[in-house]
Image (tube, grey):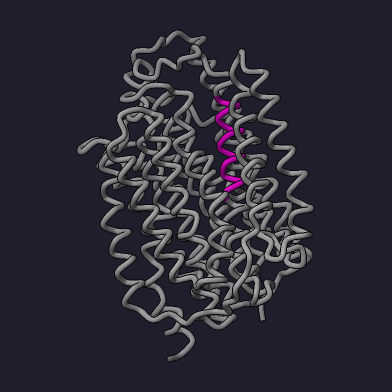
């Protein structure tokens, strides 16, 4: 089989897991206003995204280690099984707490979908052809980016938000069947001891830090904020010595001693913050400030999601054609940063077409990042750490997504004109006050949220400019 056929033949096997991982955010985000109107508690809606991403954050490195030890295809089957279980819980949830738990279970499965699929590419496709394989993944991204908002908006208004979780179950089942039937080359496999101490430190870091950020915007929770921050700091302090001592660390020190891998991981973190923060905040922005429904919001969001996937496809093929990597985000992100600040200050007053143009510039800009990140890590990581490297990229991207969503929504609700309960049902049914000062307060709140995401875009740009790995051979 030729090199290009090798990358194409793998596409059906890994395509559905990657589709599920990519479409998840946009489908659920479009449904947030209706979920809020149905279940209430406006301030807790971002946890439906953050709970999923926190679970992905913790599970990603775990799947990386288990994939290196027991085989990536087998672990991908397990990840899909857990994802199905979480989808079932979400579909029957009757309150925000149960729905959040279901999203966490989904995330425990979703943490393996992207990381293990990317590692399977590295097992089956030669290095120079991996850029082309990333281009094929970007095609899936385009499909997910198109189907996610459209399918989500249509199903929310016609069938209700629960249908979004039901539809993922047969797709995940089909992916399990395809994985079972296709023989995939097995990469370097070795028996290792799981890094339990590192995993617990990681768990404390992620949960403690995220909880502290989220509770900081609410009054009367100072003691809990300090306690959560202490847990997060303790986890961070404990993580470094555990990784030096562990026989099989989640984050091998020799892997992160490679500057290109470290820069790629940080680039992935900042990018995750921008992307997931945007797809979380934009539906709230359209529902609360522009008073648009789910389908209209989804149609406008396509300008962001389609261009993001299209940009990834073009970037992947340009990497294969030219061998260059970091050049593309180094150039494009400057325009994306300006567009984000423009959205922050003027988004509420823009016509639909100018708003879609702004979204398109942002999508084309940030869409160049992940093909570069994944290609860089696949080239620079040693063979024995390839699964951990893919898991680490997923981890950093998820940490960034949690941080970006948490910080931007905290900035939003810090200035939002709502009471402690959020009055979600009234707000989303558009019965809230339309007094000028209330509208002005919402405008300022969303400016703060989008401005926070622009800062994450600046971080992505700095990492692209400073990475030492700028070509693949």
Span colored in magenta: 398-412
Residue in the picture at 61% in, 46% down: 399
Q: Position of residue 26 (x, y in %)?
A: 41, 45
Q: Position of residue 202 (x, y in %)?
A: 65, 47
Horizontal side, residue 224 vs residue 161: left or right: right
Quadrant housing the C terminus: bottom right
Q: Is residue 100 visible?
A: yes
Q: Which percent across, then down, holds residue 225?
A: 66, 24
Tally of numbered tags: 0
Residue 167 painted magenta: no
Please give the name of the residue rendered at 37% of the width and 29% of the height, measured from the top-left corner: 33
- Which image quarter: residue 223? top right
Q: Which of the 4 image quarters holds residue 390?
A: bottom right
On screen, residue 161 versus residue 405, left or right, reads: left
Image position of 375 with respect to 221: above or below: below
| Main secondary structure of the magenta stretch | helix
Tell whether position 410 is magenta. Answer: yes
Q: What residue is shown at x 33% (from left), y 66% (from top)?
A: 176
Residue ranking furthest to the bottom: 1
Q: Nearer the viewer, residue 106 or 409?
A: 106
Image height check: is 267 above or below 293?
Answer: below
Quadrant of the frame with the N terminus: bottom left
In the orientation shown, which residue stands out farthest toward the left?
158
Instruction: Tell me where residue 182 appears, x and y as whole percent.
Output: 35, 79
Say whether residue 292 is visible: no
Q: Quadrant of residue 170?
A: bottom left
Decide which of 9, 224 is in the foreground and name it: 224
């Amino acid at each position: 089989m030729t090199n290009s056929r090798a990358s194409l033949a793998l596409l059906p096997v890994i395509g559905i897991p990657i589709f599920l991982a990519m479409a998840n955010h946009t489908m659920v985000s479009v449904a947030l206003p209706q979920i809020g109107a149905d279940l209430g508690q406006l301030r807790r809606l971002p946890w439906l995204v953050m709970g999923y991403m926190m679970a992905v954050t913790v599970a990603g490195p775990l799947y990386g280690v288990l994939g290196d030890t027991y085989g990536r295809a087998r672990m991908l089957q397990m990840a899909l099984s857990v994802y199905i279980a979480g989808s079932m819980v979400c579909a029957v949830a009757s309150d925000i707490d149960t729905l959040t738990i279901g999203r966490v279970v989904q995330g425990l499965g979703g943490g393996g979908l992207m990381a293990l699929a990317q590692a399977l590419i590295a097992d089956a496709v030669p290095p120079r052809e991996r850029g082309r394989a990333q281009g094929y993944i970007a095609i899936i991204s385009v499909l997910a980016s198109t189907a996610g908002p459209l399918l989500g908006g249509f199903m929310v208004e016609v069938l209700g938000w629960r249908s979004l979780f039901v539809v993922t179950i047969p797709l995940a089942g089909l992916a399990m069947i395809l994985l079972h039937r296709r023989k995939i080359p097995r990469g370097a496999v070795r028996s290792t001891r799981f890094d339990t101490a590192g995993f617990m430190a990681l768990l404390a870091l992620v949960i403690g830090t995220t909880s502290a950020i989220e509770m900081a915007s609410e009054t009367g929770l100072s003691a809990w904020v300090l306690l959560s921050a202490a847990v997060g700091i303790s986890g961070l302090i404990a993580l470094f010595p555990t990784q030096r001592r562990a026989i099989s660390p989640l984050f091998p020190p020799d892997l992160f001693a490679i500057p290109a891998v470290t820069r790629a991981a940080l680039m992935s973190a900042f990018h995750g913050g921008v992307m997931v923060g945007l797809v979380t905040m934009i539906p709230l922005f359209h529902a609360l400030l522009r008073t648009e429904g789910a389908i209209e919001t989804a149609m406008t969001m396509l300008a962001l999601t389609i261009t993001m996937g299209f940009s990834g496809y073009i970037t992947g093929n340009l990497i294969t054609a030219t061998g260059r990597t970091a050049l593309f985000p180094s150039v494009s992100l400057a325009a994306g940063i300006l567009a984000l600040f423009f959205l922050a200050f003027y988004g509420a007053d823009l016509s639909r077409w100018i708003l879609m143009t702004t979204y398109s510039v942002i999508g084309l800009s940030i869409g160049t990042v992940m093909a570069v990140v994944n290609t860089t890590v696949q080239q620079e990581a040693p063979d024995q750490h390839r699964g951990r490297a893919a898991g680490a990229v997923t981890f950093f991207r998820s940490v960034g997504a949690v941080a970006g969503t948490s910080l931007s929504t905290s900035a939003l609700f810090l200035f939002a004109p709502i009471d402690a309960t959020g009055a979600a049902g009234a707000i989303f049914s558009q019965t809230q006050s339309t007094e000028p000062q209330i509208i002005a307060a919402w405008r300022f709140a969303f400016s703060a949220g989008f401005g926070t995401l622009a800062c994450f875009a600046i971080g992505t740009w700095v990492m692209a400019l400073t990475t030492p790995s700028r070509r693949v051979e």
